[in-house]
Image: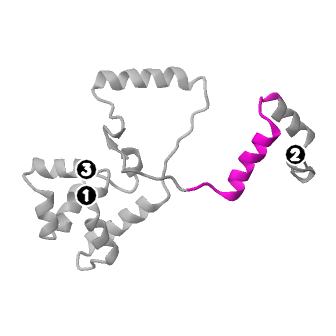
């Protein structure tokens, strides 16, 4: 046990719950200390992509199987929506739409976006839809045809990624 001050944060009911849940008081205090002191940032190796950290649900039959499992099990639990976003994607897409509206306004942020485009999880998909129209993303980047790239990224002509649909595609 740490000290008497540590015990003061818990009510008698809390202490009873800790005991009946199979945890020890030192374990709970250590968990609380982690939240109080923060967690170290994770070391990321690379972004996830389809087939590498993200499983793509294939054909219609497989999709129907997952839908059926969801419908059967969701009645037994509380379902909530989780959107892993900090707002960075929304800000990024707002900035890209602003550039599409006024291509003369090539901000440093937009330049940085295109400089790092190959690192985004959607890059291979974007490269693929451009390739269907015999366009090479590398040439478009070299010739700075950013408006065309954004057309294929943000509109129905290509991936149709917008800041409202992006998180589900990650």
Any magenta on residue 126? no
Q: Residue at x 26, y 66 (%)?
A: 114
Q: Compared to 72, does 9 lie above or below?
A: below
Give the prevailing secondary structure in the magenta stretch. Answer: helix
Occupied quadrant, residue 147? bottom left
Residue that badge 1 annotates: 118
SS at mark 2 in the image: loop
Query: Quick one: label 1 or label 2, which is nearer the N terminus?
Result: 2
- The residue segment tinted magenta is 20-40
SS at mark 1 in the image: helix
The percent coordinates of residue 7 (x first, y second) are 89, 47
User: Who is closer to the viewer here, 80 or 45?
Assistant: 45
Q: Can you tell which mark lies on residue 13?
A: none
Crowd rating for badge 1 (residues with CA inside 10 Å; few <14, some 14–19, many 20+): some
Q: Compared to 147, does 68 lie above or below?
A: above
Q: Quadrant of the N terminus?
A: top right
The percent coordinates of residue 154 (x first, y second) are 27, 57
Any magenta on residue 36? yes
Residue that badge 3 annotates: 159
Query: Quick one: label 2 or label 3, which is nearer the N terminus?
Result: 2
- Spatial separation of the CA atoms under disc 1 and disc 2: 51 Å
Occupied quadrant, residue 39? bottom right
SS at mark 3 in the image: loop
- Spatial separation of the CA atoms under disc 1 and disc 3: 15 Å
The percent coordinates of residue 83 (x first, y second) are 49, 47
- Spatial separation of the CA atoms under disc 2 and disc 3: 52 Å
Rendering colour mode: one colour
Q: Residue at x 32, y 50 (%)?
A: 121
Q: Can you tell which mark lies on residue 10?
A: 2
Do the residues bearing badges 2 and 3 touch, measured as CB atoms within 8 Å? no
Residue 112 in the figure: left or right of residue 12: left
Crowd rating for badge 3 (residues with CA inside 10 Å; few <14, some 14–19, many 20+): many
């Amino acid at each position: 046990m740490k000290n008497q001050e540590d015990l003061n944060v818990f009510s008698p009911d809390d202490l009873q719950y800790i005991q009946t849940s199979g945890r020890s008081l030192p374990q709970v205090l250590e968990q609380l200390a982690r939240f109080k002191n923060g967690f170290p940032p994770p070391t990321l190796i690379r972004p996830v992509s389809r087939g590498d950290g993200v499983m793509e649900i294939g054909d219609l039959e497989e999709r129907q199987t997952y839908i059926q499992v969801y419908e059967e099990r969701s009645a037994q639990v509380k379902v909530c929506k989780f959107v892993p976003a900090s707002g960075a994607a929304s800000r990024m897409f707002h900035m890209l739409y602003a550039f599409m509206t006024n291509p003369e306004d090539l901000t440093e942020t937009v330049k940085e976006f295109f400089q790092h485009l190959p690192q985004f999880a959607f890059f291979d998909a974007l490269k693929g839809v451009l390739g269907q129209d015999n366009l090479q993303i590398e040439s478009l980047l070299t010739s700075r045809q950013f408006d065309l790239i954004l057309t294929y990224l943000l509109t129905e002509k290509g991936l149709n990624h917008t800041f409202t649909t992006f998180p589900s595609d990650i």
